Image: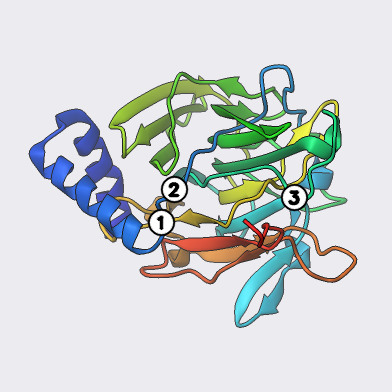
């Protein structure tokens, strides 16, 4: 709890004071990032303005009944997501209450897929979303209609070899909302979704570009499900072309500096890293060769960071 609260208060103080201490701390984060090989390139959220994301229904949420053990870790192969859930002990109990999620990641460079085809159809379109959210867990056959998921993140779309970026948030089943927030290759992004008014279901969505020292915050009204905190990458859905293939990138990293940058949740009044709670890893569905397109690592460091390897990446680049 102490570390989670320090993370929340630390970042708010960093944004508001713009102190010399912050500047030095952020420099250290960037140096550390380069050391572990995360000086990567840019990406952004939910599809191009002419290709709005469709609402997600229960059939695409993770089915927590499918949890299995893999190398001592609770794991799901399900849907188009990869990453981690932090869950209350009683996920579908009477009052699961996830009220905050913090994510810190490096935006990876994305390129066209390994075997681009001619023309501008679905075969030449790729999508990649990196996001945090609250309420992404479902039980198939139990839930119906759109899951009340609130999410915020960054998407990279590669169309005919050109990458376009989009930053935004989504209140399912509504379409994603773009926000004015610049992102470049290799930027370190801090994002937070936090309940600020329980009675009125008001949430504050915040982005902070650590690298460029840019901040955005907005308060929205939304009745989220509050049964999970989510840190994910996703193959997005396009209204014309269906679920897009992953573009070419090496890995997606949710990072921590061991201080205020990391991946934290607040569940039933307790704040802390992912590992403090009932954590479950998730990878995209296995294909016919029984190999998932992604591979999510175990939690690292203080239980607040992990890596998702892209198993479809182009080895020839």
| Residue 253 versus residue 190 in the image, above or below | below
Point out the residue furthest to the left here: 20
On the image, which quarter does residue 189 sit in? top left
Q: Position of residue 230 (x, y in %)?
A: 56, 49
Q: Residues within 10 Å of mark 3 (few under 14, many from 20)?
A: many
What number is the disc on residue 255? 1
Confirm or deny contact between disc 1 and disc 3 (CB under 8 A): no
Query: Marks 2 and 1: CB-CB under 8 Å?
Result: yes
* Image quadrant containing the C terminus: bottom right
Q: Quadrant of residue 304?
A: bottom left
Is residue 168 toward the left or the right of residue 48 in the image?
A: left
In front of the other: 196 or 73: 73
Q: Is residue 56 visible?
A: no
Q: Residue at x 37, y 64 (%)?
A: 36
Residue 210's place in the image compared with 294, above or below, is: above
- In the image, 41 versus 20, the foreground residue is 41
Q: Nearer the viewer, residue 21 or 264?
A: 21
- Residue indicated by mark 3: 80
In the rendering, at what x and y percent does residue 45 appear? 58, 33
**SS state under label 3:** loop
Residue that carries the numbered disc 2 in the rendered image: 106
**Mark 2 or 1, which is nearer the eye?**
2
Is 184 displayed left or right of 312 in the figure?
A: left
Residue at horizontal 67%, vertical 23%? 48
* Nearest to viewer (mark 2 / mark 3): 2
- Quarter that holds the N terminus: bottom left
- Say whether residue 94 is visible: yes
Instruction: Choose the circle earlier in sequence order: 2 or 3.
Output: 3
């Amino acid at each position: 709890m102490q570390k989670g609260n320090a993370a929340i208060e630390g970042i708010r103080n960093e944004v508001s004071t713009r102190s010399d201490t912050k500047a030095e701390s952020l420099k250290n984060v960037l140096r550390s990032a380069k050391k572990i090989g995360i000086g990567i390139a840019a990406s952004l959220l939910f599809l191009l303005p002419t290709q709005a994301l469709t609402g997600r229904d229960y059939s695409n949420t993770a089915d927590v009944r499918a949890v299995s053990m893999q190398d001592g870790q609770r794991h799901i192969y399900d849907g188009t997501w990869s990453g981690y859930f932090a869950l209350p002990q009683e996920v579908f109990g009477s009052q699961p209450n996830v009220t905050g999620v913090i994510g810190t990641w490096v935006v990876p460079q994305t390129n066209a897929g390994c075997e681009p085809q001619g023309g501008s159809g679905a075969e030449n379109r790729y999508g990649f979303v990196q996001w945090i959210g609250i309420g992404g867990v479902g039980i198939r056959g139990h839930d119906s209609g759109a899951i009340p998921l609130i999410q915020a993140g960054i998407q990279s779309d590669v169309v005919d070899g050109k990458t376009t970026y989009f930053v935004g948030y989504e209140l399912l089943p509504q379409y994603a909302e773009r926000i004015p927030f610049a992102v470049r290759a290799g930027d370190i992004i801090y994002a937070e979704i936090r309940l600020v008014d329980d009675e009125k279901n008001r949430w504050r969505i915040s982005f902070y570009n650590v690298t460029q020292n840019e901040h955005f915050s907005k308060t929205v009204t939304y009745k989220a499900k509050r049964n999970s905190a989510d840190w994910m990458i996703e193959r997005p859905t396009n209204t014309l072309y269906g679920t897009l293939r992953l573009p070419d990138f090496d890995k997606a990293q949710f990072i921590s500096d061991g201080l205020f940058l990391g991946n934290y949740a607040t569940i039933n009044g307790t704040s802390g890293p992912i590992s403090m709670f009932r954590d479950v890893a998730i990878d995209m569905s296995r294909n016919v060769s029984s190999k998932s397109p992604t591979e999510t690592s175990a939690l690292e460091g203080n239980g607040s960071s992990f890596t998702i390897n892209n198993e479809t990446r182009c080895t020839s680049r």
